[in-house]
Amino acid sequence: MAPPSKSPKRKSRYTADRGVAGAFEGETMTRRGVMTGGALLYGGIASAAFGLPALGFALGPMFEDGTPDVWQDVGVEADFTAETYVPKVTNVVADVGEAGKTTIYVRKLDPERDSKSKSDKGKEPLPYVAISTRCAHLGCPVRYIQASERFACPCHGGIYDFEGKVDGGPPVRPLDRFYTRVVNGRVEIGERFSVNSELERFSPRDPSSHLDGLWQYLYPARPST
Amino acid sequence: MSKLVPPIPKFLRPAPPRPGQNGPGRNGAGDENGNTPGKRGTGGQHGTAVKLREGAAEGGTQVVGWLDERSGMSPIVRAQLFRKVPKGTNWFYTLGSATLFAFVSQAVTGVFLAMYYNPDPSRAYESAAHITNEVFLGELVRGMHKWGSTVMIILIFLHMGRTFVFGAYKYPRELNWVIGVLLLVLTLAMGFTGYLLPFDQRSLWATVVGVNINASNPVIGPYLADFLRGGAEFGAATLSRFYALHMLLIPGLIGALIGAHLYMVAKLGTTAPPWLKAEKKSLSREEI
């Protein structure tokens, strides 16, 4: 018998021409090929049946809006001035427990001193400024120093001015803020939002996500927002 | 072909027949003195004692033989135990085994820590403190796991350094180097995910910053961070997610890759130290 590769009949699409045992007239695929393909196909379907839901299960939270829409009471209006920040210790996410407690710096809005945000055009600006202590570089907790009216990060030396705008160091955008409102004379803090260098509001971003210039296109917003 | 197979070591060989015995056929109805089963009387106890002693002596061989007959493992085991190693093999070649030992010790202590640990944000710190302060030998087991993780990372880097300096990553061992790098990354991931579990201030904020470092990757960063946290904010889901990664997903991957790593080592053998090769070359030149 000649080597199979050299036989011209080997290349025929009909199994009968190729000399496959038990071939039918006009048959183009071998039964072995059908069984192999079928086993792979059904194995693939069976694996996908549990694999895809499991993958979706693990990746799902990326596409959901996970932050709870809760307003937290931080005190009466008389507690706050426009000159300095008052630290308030809260849980941004309630279920993270004692270890996840973090500080929010709150002060009254100073219409003279605070820069106007594009997002507030034609609207009443937020009555209070609530600044997140999460550094916009890598998320270390920043501290407010009244003597210099600056926020300082202990990790890599990020410095922010009185409004939370970057003054120096590696941070890529101003400090995040929280929505504020006054209900029955009490100040309440709502959801987080991020701001760019002009204090324009954006959906909450991770630290180190740029919001200015060309860089902002490399750091997409969450699919849920 | 059969000449290449090393001989069975002494302790695995069946014992040679003792003087006064007639070889293997001594389980018959009567013994060599012509005693029939009915006439045991005086010699019975002595015979049983001898039989027991012989049985004990041969028991090991019989068990090994029984297993080998069914599994066919002995050529594989023999090839592993008696495989040739190059001249000049030294203590630096034990770093891989030392890393493996560190992994096994982490796996064992980790399994026992999981018996007491509770990955719930309100309970995690207390359960870890409970292990340290109240569980019998808990401080020791937790300490071994904690310090053992550092030991494993030191050892894996030393092992990598040895492989690099000795040139053991070169053909045909490139694939094993790649597997080894994956193992290094997974080991670091173990360190990262395990660091959160005590759930005190240090571990929580270190992990927050660690996740944010992941988030600083362009394009994929924000998605990666959301995947690690299980959402936009660091919450209870993050802790259980890290726990699952730390004790199920990553160890499973490490175990599988260690299997592949060791298979390749057994398949390809180890390299001789570079200085030995140089010597050999000069020798052969002189011979010419």
Image: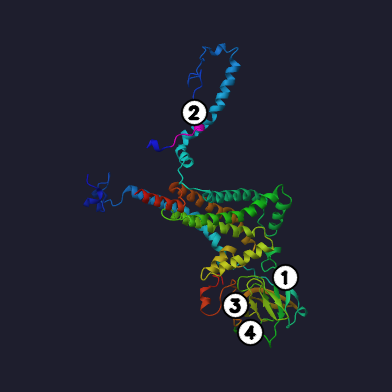
Going from N to C along the chain, the mark reached first, 1 or 4, is: 1
Please identify the residue farthest to the bottom as the structure is shown. Answer: A112
Residue span colored magenta:
B6-12
- Residue A166, picture quadrant: bottom right
Q: Is residue A16 left or right of residue A111?
A: left
Residue flagged by tag 2: what amino acid is it? Answer: Pro
Residue occupying image coordinates x 62% and y 75%: A193
Residue beneath disc 4: A123
Tell me whether marks 3 and 4 sit on the same chain. yes
- Foreground tag (1 vs 3): 3
Q: Which quarter of the image is occupied by the N terminus of chain B? A: top left
- Neighbourhood count class around disc 2 (C-alpha, 10 Å): few under 14, some 14–19, many 20 upward: some
Q: Which residue is mark 2?
A: B14
Q: Is residue A205 magenta?
A: no
Whole-number angstrom distance, CA of label 3 to CA of label 4 = 24 Å
Label 1 packing within 10 angstroms: few (<14), some (14-19), many (20+): few
Vertical order, A1 against B58 (above or below): below
B129 lies left or right of B61? right
Single out the mark in the foreground, 3 or 2.
2
